[in-house]
Amino acid sequence: MQDVPYADLAAEHRAPPSRNTLGKASVYAIFICWTLFAVFIYSRYSQLGDARAYMSGGYDDEASARTYMVTQIATTLIGLLRVDVLAHLAFSLYAATGVVYLVGQARLHGAYRWPLLALLLTPSFGVWASVVGRESLYIGTLGFFMGAMVGYFRARGLHRLLFAMVCVAGMVFIRAPFGGAMALFFLMAWMLMRGPRVGLSLGVQAMMLLTAGAIVVVLAWPQLDDYIAGEVLPKARSYFTIYSDSTRMWINIQTSRELFTSLWWTLPLAVVGPTPGEVLARPVLLPFFVSGLVVFFLLLYAIQQAFRAPAGLPRKVLVLGWLPAMLVTLIAYVPFGVYNAGSGIRYASCFLLFLVFPWMLRSAMAAAADQPASVRRRNHLHYHLAELR
Protein backbone atom coordinates (compact mmCIF):
# COMPACT_ATOMS: atom_id res chain seq x y z
CA MET A 1 0.00 0.00 0.00
CA GLN A 2 1.32 3.40 -0.96
CA ASP A 3 1.61 6.23 1.53
CA VAL A 4 0.77 8.91 -1.01
CA PRO A 5 -3.02 8.77 -0.57
CA TYR A 6 -2.56 9.12 3.18
CA ALA A 7 -0.23 12.06 2.71
CA ASP A 8 -2.51 13.78 0.21
CA LEU A 9 -5.63 13.41 2.34
CA ALA A 10 -3.80 14.39 5.52
CA ALA A 11 -2.41 17.51 3.84
CA GLU A 12 -5.88 18.27 2.55
CA HIS A 13 -7.17 18.12 6.10
CA ARG A 14 -4.38 20.26 7.54
CA ALA A 15 -4.48 22.88 4.79
CA PRO A 16 -7.26 25.03 6.26
CA PRO A 17 -6.68 26.40 9.75
CA SER A 18 -8.35 24.41 12.52
CA ARG A 19 -10.79 27.27 13.11
CA ASN A 20 -12.24 26.72 9.63
CA THR A 21 -14.76 24.20 10.87
CA LEU A 22 -18.52 24.39 11.06
CA GLY A 23 -19.33 24.82 14.73
CA LYS A 24 -22.28 22.98 16.23
CA ALA A 25 -23.44 26.17 17.93
CA SER A 26 -23.57 27.83 14.50
CA VAL A 27 -25.89 25.12 13.20
CA TYR A 28 -28.25 25.52 16.15
CA ALA A 29 -28.17 29.31 15.71
CA ILE A 30 -29.10 29.03 12.03
CA PHE A 31 -32.10 26.82 12.79
CA ILE A 32 -33.30 29.08 15.60
CA CYS A 33 -33.06 32.12 13.31
CA TRP A 34 -35.11 30.30 10.65
CA THR A 35 -37.76 29.46 13.25
CA LEU A 36 -38.09 33.09 14.28
CA PHE A 37 -38.14 34.18 10.64
CA ALA A 38 -40.82 31.64 9.72
CA VAL A 39 -43.08 32.43 12.67
CA PHE A 40 -42.80 36.21 12.78
CA ILE A 41 -42.05 37.19 9.16
CA TYR A 42 -42.76 34.43 6.64
CA SER A 43 -46.18 33.66 8.15
CA ARG A 44 -47.31 37.22 7.33
CA TYR A 45 -46.91 36.67 3.60
CA SER A 46 -47.66 32.98 3.29
CA GLN A 47 -49.32 30.25 5.32
CA LEU A 48 -47.98 27.77 7.81
CA GLY A 49 -51.26 25.91 7.44
CA ASP A 50 -50.06 22.39 8.16
CA ALA A 51 -48.07 23.53 11.20
CA ARG A 52 -51.14 25.30 12.65
CA ALA A 53 -53.31 22.25 11.96
CA TYR A 54 -50.86 19.98 13.74
CA MET A 55 -50.70 22.23 16.81
CA SER A 56 -54.48 22.75 16.99
CA GLY A 57 -55.32 19.08 16.59
CA GLY A 58 -56.87 19.69 13.19
CA TYR A 59 -55.64 16.33 11.92
CA ASP A 60 -57.02 14.23 14.78
CA ASP A 61 -59.45 12.51 12.45
CA GLU A 62 -56.78 11.86 9.83
CA ALA A 63 -56.41 8.16 9.00
CA SER A 64 -52.66 8.40 8.40
CA ALA A 65 -50.67 7.09 11.35
CA ARG A 66 -47.75 9.41 10.67
CA THR A 67 -50.01 12.47 10.56
CA TYR A 68 -51.65 11.37 13.80
CA MET A 69 -48.22 10.92 15.40
CA VAL A 70 -47.06 14.43 14.41
CA THR A 71 -50.37 15.86 15.66
CA GLN A 72 -49.98 14.15 19.02
CA ILE A 73 -46.41 15.39 19.42
CA ALA A 74 -47.37 18.95 18.46
CA THR A 75 -50.46 19.14 20.69
CA THR A 76 -48.51 17.66 23.60
CA LEU A 77 -45.81 20.30 23.19
CA ILE A 78 -48.42 23.05 23.03
CA GLY A 79 -50.01 21.70 26.19
CA LEU A 80 -46.65 21.75 27.98
CA LEU A 81 -45.08 24.92 26.59
CA ARG A 82 -48.24 27.00 26.00
CA VAL A 83 -46.47 29.12 23.36
CA ASP A 84 -46.54 28.33 19.64
CA VAL A 85 -43.04 29.55 18.92
CA LEU A 86 -41.59 27.23 21.59
CA ALA A 87 -43.29 24.25 19.94
CA HIS A 88 -41.79 25.30 16.63
CA LEU A 89 -38.39 25.59 18.30
CA ALA A 90 -38.67 22.07 19.71
CA PHE A 91 -39.17 20.63 16.21
CA SER A 92 -36.45 22.90 14.85
CA LEU A 93 -33.94 21.81 17.47
CA TYR A 94 -34.60 18.16 16.66
CA ALA A 95 -33.79 18.82 13.00
CA ALA A 96 -30.74 20.86 14.03
CA THR A 97 -29.50 18.06 16.29
CA GLY A 98 -29.60 15.63 13.36
CA VAL A 99 -27.51 18.03 11.28
CA VAL A 100 -25.12 18.58 14.20
CA TYR A 101 -24.64 14.82 14.51
CA LEU A 102 -23.82 14.66 10.80
CA VAL A 103 -21.34 17.53 11.13
CA GLY A 104 -19.62 15.78 14.02
CA GLN A 105 -19.38 12.40 12.32
CA ALA A 106 -18.03 14.00 9.11
CA ARG A 107 -15.47 16.10 11.03
CA LEU A 108 -16.70 18.84 8.73
CA HIS A 109 -13.98 21.36 7.93
CA GLY A 110 -12.45 23.49 5.22
CA ALA A 111 -14.10 23.74 1.83
CA TYR A 112 -16.37 20.79 2.60
CA ARG A 113 -18.52 22.93 4.88
CA TRP A 114 -19.58 25.44 2.22
CA PRO A 115 -22.18 23.28 0.40
CA LEU A 116 -23.88 22.49 3.70
CA LEU A 117 -23.81 26.14 4.74
CA ALA A 118 -25.26 27.16 1.37
CA LEU A 119 -28.09 24.70 1.90
CA LEU A 120 -28.77 25.70 5.51
CA LEU A 121 -29.04 29.35 4.49
CA THR A 122 -31.55 28.84 1.66
CA PRO A 123 -35.21 29.62 2.44
CA SER A 124 -36.32 26.51 0.52
CA PHE A 125 -34.69 24.42 3.23
CA GLY A 126 -34.67 26.66 6.26
CA VAL A 127 -38.31 27.67 6.60
CA TRP A 128 -39.84 24.19 6.68
CA ALA A 129 -36.93 22.59 8.50
CA SER A 130 -37.55 24.84 11.49
CA VAL A 131 -41.30 24.66 12.17
CA VAL A 132 -43.76 22.04 13.36
CA GLY A 133 -44.32 19.39 10.72
CA ARG A 134 -43.24 16.14 9.15
CA GLU A 135 -40.49 17.97 7.30
CA SER A 136 -38.48 18.89 10.40
CA LEU A 137 -38.89 15.39 11.83
CA TYR A 138 -37.71 13.84 8.56
CA ILE A 139 -34.77 16.23 8.24
CA GLY A 140 -33.57 15.48 11.75
CA THR A 141 -33.87 11.73 11.18
CA LEU A 142 -32.11 12.05 7.81
CA GLY A 143 -29.26 13.94 9.50
CA PHE A 144 -28.86 11.16 12.07
CA PHE A 145 -28.93 8.55 9.28
CA MET A 146 -26.31 10.33 7.16
CA GLY A 147 -24.13 10.81 10.21
CA ALA A 148 -24.39 7.12 11.08
CA MET A 149 -23.43 6.10 7.53
CA VAL A 150 -20.48 8.51 7.40
CA GLY A 151 -19.36 7.28 10.82
CA TYR A 152 -19.72 3.66 9.74
CA PHE A 153 -17.58 4.33 6.68
CA ARG A 154 -14.92 5.94 8.86
CA ALA A 155 -14.99 3.41 11.71
CA ARG A 156 -16.96 0.17 11.71
CA GLY A 157 -19.39 -0.28 14.56
CA LEU A 158 -22.54 -2.34 15.02
CA HIS A 159 -24.15 0.49 16.99
CA ARG A 160 -23.88 2.81 13.97
CA LEU A 161 -25.36 0.16 11.70
CA LEU A 162 -28.30 -0.43 14.02
CA PHE A 163 -28.81 3.31 14.47
CA ALA A 164 -28.90 3.77 10.68
CA MET A 165 -31.50 0.99 10.37
CA VAL A 166 -33.71 2.65 12.98
CA CYS A 167 -33.41 5.94 11.12
CA VAL A 168 -34.39 4.27 7.84
CA ALA A 169 -37.48 2.82 9.49
CA GLY A 170 -38.37 6.26 10.83
CA MET A 171 -37.95 7.92 7.44
CA VAL A 172 -40.06 5.26 5.71
CA PHE A 173 -42.77 5.92 8.29
CA ILE A 174 -42.65 9.71 7.94
CA ARG A 175 -42.23 9.96 4.13
CA ALA A 176 -42.48 6.52 2.54
CA PRO A 177 -41.15 7.33 -1.00
CA PHE A 178 -38.15 9.29 0.26
CA GLY A 179 -37.53 6.79 3.05
CA GLY A 180 -37.60 3.95 0.52
CA ALA A 181 -34.83 5.68 -1.43
CA MET A 182 -32.78 5.94 1.77
CA ALA A 183 -33.33 2.22 2.36
CA LEU A 184 -31.91 1.59 -1.12
CA PHE A 185 -28.86 3.70 -0.30
CA PHE A 186 -28.38 1.91 3.02
CA LEU A 187 -28.50 -1.50 1.33
CA MET A 188 -26.09 -0.56 -1.45
CA ALA A 189 -23.63 1.21 0.87
CA TRP A 190 -23.65 -1.66 3.34
CA MET A 191 -23.07 -4.22 0.59
CA LEU A 192 -20.18 -2.19 -0.80
CA MET A 193 -18.55 -1.64 2.58
CA ARG A 194 -19.07 -5.10 4.06
CA GLY A 195 -19.66 -7.37 1.08
CA PRO A 196 -17.03 -9.56 -0.61
CA ARG A 197 -14.44 -7.80 -2.74
CA VAL A 198 -15.37 -8.77 -6.28
CA GLY A 199 -12.45 -7.01 -7.97
CA LEU A 200 -14.69 -5.43 -10.62
CA SER A 201 -14.30 -1.88 -11.86
CA LEU A 202 -16.84 0.85 -11.15
CA GLY A 203 -18.05 0.78 -14.75
CA VAL A 204 -18.70 -2.97 -14.72
CA GLN A 205 -20.50 -2.79 -11.38
CA ALA A 206 -22.58 0.14 -12.63
CA MET A 207 -23.65 -1.86 -15.67
CA MET A 208 -24.56 -4.80 -13.46
CA LEU A 209 -26.59 -2.51 -11.21
CA LEU A 210 -28.40 -0.97 -14.19
CA THR A 211 -29.17 -4.41 -15.59
CA ALA A 212 -30.50 -5.66 -12.26
CA GLY A 213 -32.56 -2.50 -11.84
CA ALA A 214 -34.02 -2.83 -15.34
CA ILE A 215 -34.99 -6.47 -14.68
CA VAL A 216 -36.70 -5.50 -11.41
CA VAL A 217 -38.61 -2.67 -13.10
CA VAL A 218 -39.75 -4.94 -15.96
CA LEU A 219 -40.94 -7.65 -13.59
CA ALA A 220 -42.68 -5.22 -11.24
CA TRP A 221 -43.97 -2.83 -13.92
CA PRO A 222 -47.68 -3.87 -13.81
CA GLN A 223 -47.85 -3.24 -10.07
CA LEU A 224 -45.64 -0.14 -10.32
CA ASP A 225 -47.74 1.30 -13.13
CA ASP A 226 -50.97 0.74 -11.20
CA TYR A 227 -49.48 2.36 -8.10
CA ILE A 228 -48.20 5.45 -9.93
CA ALA A 229 -51.24 5.99 -12.15
CA GLY A 230 -53.84 4.90 -9.63
CA GLU A 231 -52.52 6.36 -6.39
CA VAL A 232 -49.52 8.68 -6.69
CA LEU A 233 -50.60 10.92 -9.57
CA PRO A 234 -54.26 11.35 -8.46
CA LYS A 235 -53.12 12.04 -4.90
CA ALA A 236 -50.57 14.61 -6.09
CA ARG A 237 -53.20 16.44 -8.15
CA SER A 238 -55.76 16.37 -5.34
CA TYR A 239 -53.36 18.00 -2.87
CA PHE A 240 -53.52 21.38 -4.62
CA THR A 241 -56.59 23.55 -4.90
CA ILE A 242 -57.54 25.55 -7.99
CA TYR A 243 -57.91 28.57 -5.73
CA SER A 244 -54.22 28.65 -4.86
CA ASP A 245 -52.24 31.36 -6.62
CA SER A 246 -49.27 29.04 -7.09
CA THR A 247 -51.10 25.99 -8.50
CA ARG A 248 -50.05 25.23 -12.08
CA MET A 249 -53.32 24.45 -13.78
CA TRP A 250 -51.63 23.88 -17.13
CA ILE A 251 -49.90 20.72 -15.91
CA ASN A 252 -51.86 17.48 -16.03
CA ILE A 253 -49.84 14.25 -15.78
CA GLN A 254 -52.19 11.26 -15.82
CA THR A 255 -50.12 8.18 -16.69
CA SER A 256 -46.80 6.65 -15.72
CA ARG A 257 -45.60 7.06 -19.29
CA GLU A 258 -46.33 10.79 -19.17
CA LEU A 259 -44.50 11.06 -15.86
CA PHE A 260 -41.29 9.41 -17.08
CA THR A 261 -41.25 10.95 -20.57
CA SER A 262 -41.71 14.45 -19.14
CA LEU A 263 -38.93 14.21 -16.56
CA TRP A 264 -36.56 16.17 -18.81
CA TRP A 265 -38.55 19.35 -18.02
CA THR A 266 -40.66 18.49 -14.95
CA LEU A 267 -37.63 17.50 -12.86
CA PRO A 268 -35.77 20.84 -13.26
CA LEU A 269 -39.05 22.70 -12.81
CA ALA A 270 -39.84 20.85 -9.59
CA VAL A 271 -36.32 21.26 -8.19
CA VAL A 272 -36.04 24.99 -8.93
CA GLY A 273 -39.59 25.76 -7.82
CA PRO A 274 -41.01 29.13 -8.87
CA THR A 275 -40.49 30.22 -12.47
CA PRO A 276 -39.53 33.82 -13.41
CA GLY A 277 -43.13 34.40 -14.50
CA GLU A 278 -44.47 33.19 -11.16
CA VAL A 279 -41.99 35.43 -9.36
CA LEU A 280 -43.23 38.45 -11.33
CA ALA A 281 -46.79 37.59 -10.39
CA ARG A 282 -45.89 36.99 -6.72
CA PRO A 283 -42.65 38.81 -5.76
CA VAL A 284 -42.69 37.07 -2.39
CA LEU A 285 -41.45 33.97 -4.25
CA LEU A 286 -38.20 35.65 -5.33
CA PRO A 287 -36.07 34.31 -2.42
CA PHE A 288 -37.35 30.80 -3.14
CA PHE A 289 -36.56 31.16 -6.84
CA VAL A 290 -32.99 32.16 -5.99
CA SER A 291 -32.63 29.34 -3.47
CA GLY A 292 -34.11 26.93 -6.04
CA LEU A 293 -31.35 27.86 -8.45
CA VAL A 294 -28.81 27.30 -5.68
CA VAL A 295 -30.29 23.85 -5.01
CA PHE A 296 -30.32 22.96 -8.72
CA PHE A 297 -26.66 23.84 -9.25
CA LEU A 298 -25.76 22.20 -5.93
CA LEU A 299 -27.34 19.00 -7.28
CA LEU A 300 -25.27 19.19 -10.47
CA TYR A 301 -22.13 19.92 -8.44
CA ALA A 302 -22.84 17.00 -6.09
CA ILE A 303 -23.15 14.62 -9.04
CA GLN A 304 -19.81 15.86 -10.33
CA GLN A 305 -18.26 15.34 -6.89
CA ALA A 306 -19.57 11.77 -6.80
CA PHE A 307 -17.72 10.89 -9.99
CA ARG A 308 -14.60 12.78 -8.88
CA ALA A 309 -14.39 11.10 -5.49
CA PRO A 310 -11.26 9.06 -4.73
CA ALA A 311 -11.22 5.88 -6.80
CA GLY A 312 -12.20 2.67 -5.09
CA LEU A 313 -14.74 2.31 -2.32
CA PRO A 314 -15.53 6.04 -1.80
CA ARG A 315 -16.46 6.53 -5.46
CA LYS A 316 -18.41 3.27 -5.53
CA VAL A 317 -20.45 4.26 -2.46
CA LEU A 318 -21.34 7.57 -4.10
CA VAL A 319 -21.93 6.42 -7.69
CA LEU A 320 -23.55 3.07 -6.93
CA GLY A 321 -25.29 4.04 -3.68
CA TRP A 322 -25.87 7.77 -3.31
CA LEU A 323 -26.59 8.55 -6.98
CA PRO A 324 -29.33 5.89 -7.53
CA ALA A 325 -30.97 6.83 -4.22
CA MET A 326 -30.89 10.51 -5.22
CA LEU A 327 -32.46 9.67 -8.59
CA VAL A 328 -35.26 7.64 -6.99
CA THR A 329 -35.89 10.47 -4.53
CA LEU A 330 -36.14 13.08 -7.27
CA ILE A 331 -38.51 10.98 -9.40
CA ALA A 332 -40.72 10.35 -6.35
CA TYR A 333 -40.71 14.09 -5.63
CA VAL A 334 -41.70 15.31 -9.11
CA PRO A 335 -45.48 14.63 -8.90
CA PHE A 336 -45.68 16.57 -5.64
CA GLY A 337 -43.26 19.34 -6.63
CA VAL A 338 -44.37 20.20 -10.13
CA TYR A 339 -48.04 21.10 -9.57
CA ASN A 340 -47.54 23.82 -6.98
CA ALA A 341 -44.36 25.84 -6.47
CA GLY A 342 -45.16 26.76 -2.88
CA SER A 343 -45.99 23.26 -1.69
CA GLY A 344 -43.15 21.83 -3.76
CA ILE A 345 -40.71 23.85 -1.67
CA ARG A 346 -42.06 22.18 1.47
CA TYR A 347 -41.80 18.66 0.06
CA ALA A 348 -38.28 19.28 -1.29
CA SER A 349 -36.99 20.42 2.11
CA CYS A 350 -37.18 16.79 3.29
CA PHE A 351 -34.47 15.43 1.03
CA LEU A 352 -32.28 18.46 0.29
CA LEU A 353 -29.85 17.54 3.08
CA PHE A 354 -29.01 14.34 1.20
CA LEU A 355 -27.48 16.47 -1.58
CA VAL A 356 -24.41 17.23 0.51
CA PHE A 357 -23.52 13.62 1.35
CA PRO A 358 -20.56 13.52 -1.10
CA TRP A 359 -18.85 16.37 0.77
CA MET A 360 -19.60 14.80 4.16
CA LEU A 361 -17.93 11.55 3.10
CA ARG A 362 -14.87 13.29 1.70
CA SER A 363 -14.51 15.47 4.81
CA ALA A 364 -14.57 12.39 7.04
CA MET A 365 -11.90 10.73 4.89
CA ALA A 366 -9.64 13.78 4.91
CA ALA A 367 -9.92 14.15 8.68
CA ALA A 368 -9.32 10.46 9.38
CA ALA A 369 -6.31 10.32 7.08
CA ASP A 370 -4.52 12.70 9.43
CA GLN A 371 -4.78 10.23 12.32
CA PRO A 372 -1.84 8.04 13.40
CA ALA A 373 -1.41 4.84 11.41
CA SER A 374 -2.40 2.69 14.40
CA VAL A 375 -5.72 4.49 14.68
CA ARG A 376 -6.33 4.17 10.95
CA ARG A 377 -5.81 0.41 11.15
CA ARG A 378 -8.15 0.16 14.08
CA ASN A 379 -10.97 2.05 12.38
CA HIS A 380 -10.50 0.24 9.02
CA LEU A 381 -9.95 3.44 7.02
CA HIS A 382 -6.75 2.05 5.54
CA TYR A 383 -8.83 -0.47 3.62
CA HIS A 384 -10.63 2.37 1.89
CA LEU A 385 -7.55 4.44 1.24
CA ALA A 386 -5.68 1.44 -0.15
CA GLU A 387 -8.11 1.47 -3.07
CA LEU A 388 -7.31 5.06 -4.04
CA ARG A 389 -5.50 5.65 -7.28
Image (spheres, rainbow, N blue to C red):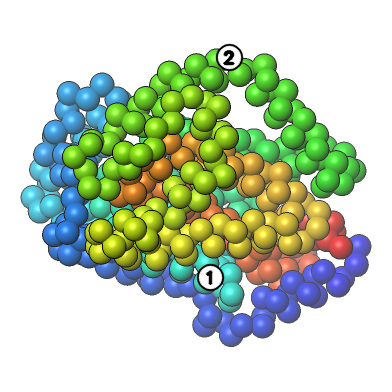
Residue 337, can we see it?
A: yes
Give the residue at x 27% y 68%. Answer: 33
Asked where in the image residue 303 lies, by quadrant, the reply is bottom right
Q: Is residue 355 left or right of residue 83?
A: right
Q: Look at the numbered disc 2 and give the secondary structure of its residue.
A: helix
Q: Is residue 106 left or right of residue 291?
A: right
Give the residue at x 58% y 76%. Answer: 110
Residue 105, can we see it?
A: no
Give the numbered dot on residue 11.
Answer: none
Q: Is there CB contact under 8 Å for labels 2 and 1?
A: no
Q: Position of residue 48 (x, y in %)?
A: 20, 49
Q: Which residue corresponds to mark 2?
A: 222
Asked where in the image residue 243 lies, by quadrant, the reply is top left
Q: Name the quarter where the C terminus is drawn.
A: bottom right
Q: Which residue corresponds to mark 1?
A: 113
| Spatial separation of the CA atoms under disc 2 and disc 1 | 44 Å
Q: Residues within 10 Å of mark 1 (few under 14, many from 20)?
A: many
Q: Earlier in the sequence, mark 2 or mark 1?
A: 1
Q: Look at the numbered disc 1 and give the secondary structure of its residue.
A: helix
Q: Position of residue 228 (x, y in %)?
A: 48, 24
- The front one of 319 and 260 is 260
Q: Is residue 194 above or below residue 122?
A: above
Which amino acid, by three-letter code, is at mark 2? Pro
Asked where in the image residue 122 lies, by quadrant, the reply is bottom left
Q: Position of residue 264 (x, y in %)?
A: 57, 44
Q: Position of residue 194 (x, y in %)?
A: 74, 40
Q: Residues within 10 Å of mark 2 (few under 14, many from 20)?
A: few
Which amino acid, by three-letter code, is at mark 1? Arg
List the single residue furthest toward the bottom: 17
Give the residue at x 61% y 83%. Answer: 16
